Amino acid sequence: MGRLSLYFRELYRLRDSKTTTINSKELGKLVNVSSPVVRRDLSALGTIGQRGVGYSVDALIERIGQVLGSGKQWEVVLVGVGSLGDALLRYRGFSRLGFKLTAAFDIDPSRIGSTIGGVQVLDANELERVVTAAPPSLAILAVPADNAADVATLLVSLGVSGILNFAPTTLKLPPRIAVVNVDLASELQRLAFAVQSVK
Amino acid sequence: MGRLSLYFRELYRLRDSKTTTINSKELGKLVNVSSPVVRRDLSALGTIGQRGVGYSVDALIERIGQVLGSGKQWEVVLVGVGSLGDALLRYRGFSRLGFKLTAAFDIDPSRIGSTIGGVQVLDANELERVVTAAPPSLAILAVPADNAADVATLLVSLGVSGILNFAPTTLKLPPRIAVVNVDLASELQRLAFAVQSVK
């Protein structure tokens, strides 16, 4: 899964720059793996390059997208429009992978009613109504740690099945709920740890 | 390393809420692991709880901090003050882990000269001079993918030994340089993949 994601984003960049085919060596270079690894990964998906030509960029994007679940459109709500939430709303990388931010929620009156990155910021009081009316598959949690548990539990009770959690706390949710945690400070700590290990 | 990081941030929250001791069962609950696992992890660091009392929160923070490299102060520069860079500058989670953002750089005149989260945004033209004068250990890269390779190479040539990369591209750097990648779209993709797998 990790490498497929890397191929995928490089393929998107290639398509943006009007490249239509790529061979395993070139693709491997872009993600720092050898061409036999690329060929093995891609043949596991049933995709085979053409000798002397390589792979069709479009065909690879379509196939890897199916495997990664980006073949479908995922509706996503964001809860918490602080500076991180704001950045997430402006982030252009989600839509190309099939994610559609449908609404954002906050409790701050100065944020409510604004439109950021094309998404309307609604009053958190409306979360239940809006999410019940059109349940999104996924939610992004960008609230302070102290509110994260309550918001996550509410989202799950309303039918959300996956949460991308930016709050620096461990969520305790039923096992059927998928959670991916992104803790910015921990990532920096992981880097510091790696720097010490390299030395 | 993963679990230590989780204990660490929960311990910080406990200290903030004036909790001075915690036992393995309570700490385990906060990070979703069993108390024997907690005891094993902590005894591997040479920390032993007192029967009936538990562990000193302060002592655990100090010990885990040493192991994770947060015992020392790490100086960090940020390159790229778009909306994500802006959020990173405002983010309060870094300083408590021993990371000090010393400067930020951008090419956008409307950003240059401003102070965000207490950090001055400087002209990217000054990067070489500033970093040479006081080399930081780590850099956070929040520039567009197309500029990431050049900026990373420049930072490394100036003595930076670790890069937290938010640009959605794979950096090719010498093996002595530590790199941690955070790709927001890939994290959401990973979540979508997990949701499909759970079903």
Image (spheres, coloured by chain):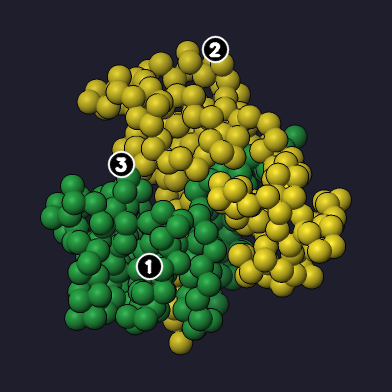
Chain colours: A yellow, B green
Chain where mark 2 sits = A
Amino acid type, mark 1: Val
Q: Is residue A174 left or right of residue B151?
A: right
- Measure how far apart labels 2 and 1 are at the Cα level: 46 Å
- Measure how far apart labels 2 and 3 are at the Cα level: 28 Å
> How crowded is the residue under tag 3: few (<14 C-alpha within 10 Å), some, or many (20+)?
some
Query: Residue A122: horizontal and vertical position, in percent?
Result: 36, 20
Whether B79 is drawn above or below B31: the answer is: below
Q: Nearer the viewer, mark 2 or mark 1?
A: 1
Q: Are marks 2 and 3 on the same chain?
A: yes
Query: Residue A93: horizontal and vertical position, in percent?
Result: 50, 43
Q: Nearer the viewer, residue B73 or B54?
A: B73
Q: Which residue is mark 3?
A: A83
Chain where mark 1 sits = B
Query: Residue A30: horizontal and vertical position, in percent?
Result: 61, 65
Amino acid type, mark 3: Ser
Image quarter of residue B102: bottom left
Image quarter of residue A71: top right
Image quarter of residue A82: top left
Q: Which residue is mark 1?
A: B151
Label at residue A169: none
Q: First in sequence: mark 2 or mark 3?
A: 3
Label 1 secondary element: helix
Q: Nearer the viewer, residue A64 or B178?
A: A64
Residue at 52% across, 19% down = A131
